[in-house]
Every structure is written in C-alpha cells, then in structure tokens.
Image (tube, helix red, strand yellow):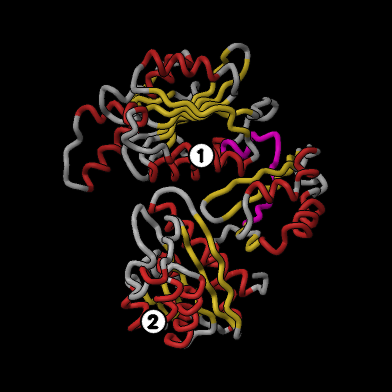
Amino acid sequence: MLKSVNELLPKKGVDETIEKVALLTSGTELLMGQIINTNAAYLAGELNKLGLTCQYQLVVGDNEERLLDALNKLWKVADCVILTGGLGPTEDDLSMACAAKNSGFKLTFDPEAAATIEAYFKRSGRNVPQNNYKQAYLPGAEAGFALPNLNGTAPGAIWRFVHDNKLCHLILLPGPPLENKLMFTEYVKPYLAARCSTILRNLFFRMVGIGESQVAAELEDLITTQTNPTLATYCSVGEVKLRLTQNCHSDSDSELIPALADVVRSRLGKYIYSEKDESLPEVIYNILKHRGESLGLAESCTAGAVAAELGNIPGVSHVFKGSLVAYSPEIKKNVLGVPKDIIDRDGVVSAACAASMAEHAQKLLNVSIAGAVTGLAGPTGSAVQDSTNAAALGKAEPPIGTVFVAVTYRGRTVVKHNLFSGSRAKVIAWAKMTLLGLIWHCLNDEA
C-alpha cells in the first residue's frame, strides 16, 4: 500500500510522460440508464485543468471479456487509461482482475489493505464479510502502486507496464463519487501532474443577454483563424460561456491569452458578467453588497424559483429582502397592487403587468431594485381568462412560452418580451435566468 505521495514521483532518467488519456467506466447500471456517469464529467474536467487531453470516454458492462477488449482498444489511442468502478467485493466487480490480466502481472494479497478493511468494519461494530477480502488483492511493488481509500473499503491502483512497446499507465478508481474524487485528488492528480508534457492556461468569460450564435458571429474572424490560443463556446440555459485556452510547454512560455482577451472584451464586454467561477446570482449579490443596495422580486410563472436561486448564496439576506409570489390575478391585484384596468386591458401576461409588478414590489419591499416576471409556462394556461372584460375586448391569448420580465431601478423601468419553447420546466428555467440577466444589465446600465 502506498505510504507517501513522494513514491508517485517519476524515476530519474526514465521518460514517463503522459500525453493522451482515456476514461473507461465499468458498470452495467450505467448502460441501463439507472445512474448518471458523474465521475466521467468530473475526471474530464480535472484532466483538462492539468493540461491533459481526454481522447475517449467509454462505458462497458460488468463483463471480463468486454473490459479486456476495451482496454486493448484504448491502448491504441492513449498512454493512460483511468478505469472507474468494479472494485467492490462482489463477483461482478472485475476491474482489478482485468487489470492484472491486461498488464501481465499477478495480484498479491496485501495484509495492510486487509487490516484497513477490518478496521473499517470494526468501527461500525460489524464482522468483515469474507468476500470483502477480495479487495485486499492488489498490484505488487513491481507492477505499480496500491492506493488507500480514505472513504471506503476498495483500494485503488496504478498499474505500470509495457504494451505494444510503450509505457502504459492504468489507473483504477472506485465508483462511489466521494471515494473517487478524494482518491483522485490525493494520489492520482499528483501522479499525473508530475508526468504532463504541457501546461494549459484557461480564461473563461460568462455572458448573459446574448446567444451562442451571436457570440460566434462577433468572434468569427478569431475562431476561423485560431491556432494557439483557441476559443470555444458553450451554452446553457440563459447564458453562454467562452473559453480561451493556451497550450504551453513550460511556465516560462509567454502568455498570449491577455491580448486575445482584450479583443473579446472590446466586442462583447457589455454581455460579460464574470471572468471567474461564479454564478450570475453571486455576481448580482456582490454588486448590491458593494453598493449597499437591496433587491426584491415579484414572481408569477416562476413561483419563487428566482428567489430560491438567490437564497442559495450565504449571506444574501444582507441585500435580498424577499419575493412576492403573485400567481393568480387576484393576488397580483389585491396584494401586489397591480391596477385592475391593466389586468383587464392588457392581461396578466403583458409588458404593462410586468412593469407594474416590478414597480409595486419596489415600493412594498422598500428596495433599491426590483425585478418581476409573468408568463405562460404551459402546457396550458390563460393570460386573459380572469379579466372581467376580456371577451368584450376580444383579446387573443399570447402563445405558451410567452414571458415578460421587468426591472425597476433608479426611477427607470425596463421590460423585455420573450417567447421560449420547450417543456414547462424549460420555460421556467429560461424565465428565471432572463430576469436575473436583466437585473444584472440594469445594475450595469446596459439594459
């Protein structure tokens, strides 16, 4: 069993460089859609931070033949394979045995690992099931390293062997995410970092109020001529992320990202809400806290979802005063104070109603800035059915997915009309992010 992280350092005079990594996951439950492969997403992100390229991600069932076949295929495209799962005590946990067969080395019984397993069960007053001793059969010193599991009974391993005339690194990690992340952080990350041939420098821009296609259009000349650094866009509900990446061979390489970043800022600056790993609600909170201002909300179709997003931030009570969930026309009128003539004339899903909701929320909650949202999330609903004279006015129903967001700040009210498609949950998610985006734009006077 590994005693010190220092044992993981490369041997002097031996080229142990790792350039291409593949992720292999063992688990029939993944192939059946019973659980999501969160380990692969985590590991791919960590590899990227280290400057390593993840060439392939592959999932196979708990089958020895398919596991060995997958390993042999991956060695053709990678010099390091990280195999996750299959380290448990049952018969279908096959990863360690397959690693031994693939490497040509034998498993050896590790008394220290067995003692660790016994201590784990003793802490909970249980006897060790006989099949758990299977987890104490690990690679010997000539084959690699056995990695302690600080959160469970299944040790991991790093196997090192020659396959088709190249040095291969086969890393085994447990499947449970808590065990997987801790073992990777404590042992595997230092092992890989000591063998990387490149260094990646990344800068992320997070944008709101602009679509991915528009970002691509604004940066088309940079994208079509990119070499190093590179640019890549990623979109999620209500926001776009842009990543700038420079591939360096050493820390002394000149930094090329700052010059490219200045060009991006000059073209898209009014949409960039952060260049850090922070969410839009966190940015809004920090702005308000810095200014000594406060925020309130009036929500209809989102039913408090925007407030819940803000409520996840520690200390947000210093700036966020509350949200009035005015779901029905009666509450909009009798509690929030939206005038009856607006509801009758324009309907509850309208620019006028959204503006009135924001303005009344600002007064009722006594806040610096107030946001409001009203809309039809679907799959059914009516914006005018509760208006007393809707039929007389002959008003047409707005389509499902219609959402109005409004913000009142420093004597000015801004309203945005949106039409979203998709499920009810998707429309609500878009409405939530759109209101947060408008609040941020108004705080930055870019609305």
Query: Which secondary structure, mark 1?
Result: helix
Q: Is residue 218 visible?
A: yes
374 in relation to 52, above or below: below
Q: Nearer the viewer, residue 37 or 386?
A: 386
- Name the mark on residue 8: none
Q: Nearer the viewer, residue 334 or 276?
A: 334
Residue 355 point in image, percent of width and height:
51, 76
Q: Is residue 198 magenta?
A: yes
Q: Is residue 182 magenta?
A: no
Compare marks 1 and 2 and give the one earlier in the sequence: 1
75 in relation to 335, above or below: above
73 in relation to 400, above or below: above
211 in relation to 72, above or below: below
Q: Amino acid at mark 2?
A: Lys
Q: Quadrant of residue 392?
A: bottom left
Tag 2 residue: 340
Residue 82 point in image, percent of width and height:
49, 30
Q: Amino acid at mark 1?
A: Leu
Q: Residue at x 62, y 12 (%)?
A: 165
Q: Residue at x 66, y 55 (%)?
A: 205
- Would residue 118 be found to the left or right of residue 164 on screen? left
Tag 1 residue: 43
Query: Which secondary structure, mark 2?
Result: helix
Q: How far is the residue under mark 1 from the one under mark 2? A: 56 Å
Q: Nearer the viewer, residue 358 or 89?
A: 358
Which stretch did the figure color magenta? 191-206
Residue 427 point in image, percent of width and height:
44, 55
Q: Residue at x 53, y 50 (%)?
A: 236
Q: Are marks 1 and 2 in contact (CB under 8 Å)?
A: no
Q: Residue at x 60, y 36 (%)?
A: 9
> Which part of the image, by quadrant, shows the C terminus?
bottom right
